Every structure is written in structure tokens, then in C-alpha cells.
Image (cartoon, rainbow, N blue to C red):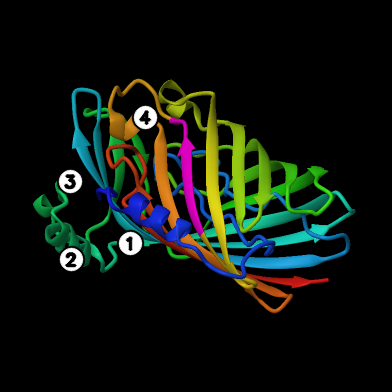
Amino acid sequence: MNGRWALPLALVFLVTPFRGVAQQPSFGPLTWEEGAPLQRISSTPAFERAEITARGAVSAELWLGYSNIFEQDSSATHVLFLDTERILTAATVRWGVSERIEVGGRVTLETTGGGTLDSFVHWYHERLGFGQANRDRFPRDGYAQRLSDGGPTMYLDVRRRTLGIEDLQLFAKWSAATSGDGRSTLSVRATARLPGQSNRLAAERADATLVALSRLGAGSWYLHGMLGTGVVRASPELEPILRDAHAFFGLAAERSLGASLAAIVQYQVASPLLRGFEHREIDWPSSNLILGLAGRWGEEWSWDASFQEDLPADTPAIDFTVGLRITRTWR
């Protein structure tokens, strides 16, 4: 899907003047992580707040991401066919151990299948003049997650799942620095990941990531950043096509719309995990534009809602994801 109008419209919205929004709290960034099947062979860190949970407080978070995925391509090096709709259900618990450290865990459940949105996606691609990327050559609402070398060697073959455990993550986050007014902060998060069984041909292995998270506040604006790296580990069958490590970067601009609401434009890039295919849709960086709103209800509840668009479209990033997060905090 071509996102040529998404960024200009988002920028116009963000710079529209609002009264009475100076010095409001931050609610961003938007909760989101790379959803492309070719990227999720290894860890896919979520962009989250640089702020840590207060000492003694506990928070419980639920994030749902609904994705429509279609990629079909073949060349001398590969045959790729991804056709599915997927729901990711991620439940996270955090505890403020001290003034500067939080620890927590997260379990991600995955549901995949043929879905029901292919006809709608085909329709709006036609109405907006976007290309179909070969969607119109295959039956709608089908299912496939396969990657091969074009011959007998298969690299990826993922069956349908219903609330299957995708992974379990354990993490610790350290607050490295915070400004006097608390509006700007820098933290570091270390995460260990234990994958669930998904690829029938070559199992993933435990891996780890290290991420720096930042927030800079000025007036009614906040700027959020994420920069990190991780190791890539899988069964020996995949080692010839996998890189040893990957990196990721995110940047988000947040504009306060009042005491309980903010608009956010976010951009994220992840380096490729696969190598040797010499094709943009497989071994090039994955990049996404995410637009959304974030806010709170009272002092205990917070939320964000987002829409992700692959930009540019000819990368491993998936077509789109609609996300929703709800968080409850006990202080």
C-alpha cells in the first residue's frame, strides 16, 4: 500500500494550533513492533516509554495488533508467499523495584489464518489507485507462510495458529538520567527472549536485545527515540541465510491535545535479518510509518490506538497493522 498522503496529512494535523496544551504530560510513544514474518524469526523490540514504573508500583498492559499480510515473489534465489491475517496479543506486567529500575515479563500469543479483509483491501487499493502487488492473482482470504530457495530447500513454513505462544520475554529497564521537571529522560532496557514453536522447518533459539529509550519535552511537544541492537539465533538450517545481529531505530513526535490526549507520528526502521537473496522485499531494511492517539483515563488507566503503514512499500514490512493498548497501574 502506498502511503504518499499519510505523512503530509499527519504533519498538517500535528502543527495545527491547539490552545491550553502547554506543559501537559506525555502519553507516547505508540506501542508498536515490527510485524513482518521475515523479521519475527528473531526478537522484534517494541517501542515503549523511556519512563520507568514508579517504585513499588505495578502495571498490567494488554496490546492487540491486527495485521493483513500479503507478499508474493519469486526469483533465481527464492520463492516467497505470505498470505495471512494475524492477531498478536501481548500481555505485559511491570514492577518498579527502585527509583531507577523496573523489571517485568511479557507473553505474546499469535493467531493466524486466512482472515476476512482481503476483499476490503482489494477494494480500497482499487479506489485509491494503489497497486495490488499480485493480490488479484490468488484466491482471497487464503493462508500461506512459506519461503524456499526456489528448489527443494525450505526455510520457512509456518502453520495456522490459534492463541499459540509466540514468545516469552523477561526484561529490566534502568533510568539513566532524568531532567529536573521530569519531561526529558533516558533509559536502557535489556531483554531476554524465549521463543515458542512456530516454524516447522527450523526452530528459533533464545536471543537478547539491548535498547536505549529517550524522551525530550519542550512546551506542548515531546520527541521520543529508540535505538537498539540484538543477536540473531536460530537452528543450523537457517544459519546460511541469517545475519548474526540486527539493529533498530525509532523516532516519534508527540503533540499534546489537552490534559488527557495526544496525537503521535512515529517512524521505525529495522535492519534485515536475512541475507543473500538480493531482493528488496526480503533482505532490505524494514520501515514503517505509524499514526495514532494516546491518552489516559484518570490516574490509573492509559491507552493508545495506532495504524501502521509500510513506507516504502517494497520492503519486508507488512501492509498494515491496527493496534490498541490498554494499561492499568496500581501505585
Mark 3, residue position: 133
- Figure quadrant of the C terminus: bottom right
Mark 1, residue position: 113
At 67% across and 43% down in the image, what residue appears? 213
What's drawn in magenta, residue-wise?
Answer: 264-273
Farthest-out residue, bottom: 298
Query: Does 177 lie within the magenta span?
Result: no
Pick the residue in front: 255 or 248: 255
Pick the residue in front: 12 or 70: 12
Crowding near the residue tagged with mark 1, few <14, some 14–19, many ≥20 C-alpha atoms within 10 Å: some
180 on left or right of 289: right
Quadrant assignment, res 302:
bottom right
Q: Main secondary structure of the magenta part?
A: strand
Amino acid at dot 4: Trp
Amino acid at dot 1: Gly
Q: Position of residue 5 (x, y in %)?
A: 28, 52
Residue 28 to residue 281: above or below? below
Q: Position of residue 39 (x, y in %)?
A: 44, 40
Q: Position of residue 4 (x, y in %)?
A: 27, 48
Crowding near the residue tagged with mark 4, few <14, some 14–19, many ≥20 C-alpha atoms within 10 Å: many
At 44% across and 57% down in the image, what residue appears? 291
Quadrant assignment, res 76:
top left
Q: Residues at badges 1 and 3 in contact (C-beta under 8 Å)?
A: no
Q: Residues at badges 4 and 2 in contact (C-beta under 8 Å)?
A: no
Mark number displayed over residue 284: 4
> What separation in Å lies between label 4 and label 2 (alpha carbons)?
29 Å
Secondary element at image label 4: loop
Pick the residue in front: 168 or 13: 13
100 on left or right of 205: right
> What separation in Å lies between label 4 and label 3 (alpha carbons)?
18 Å
Amino acid at dot 3: Ala
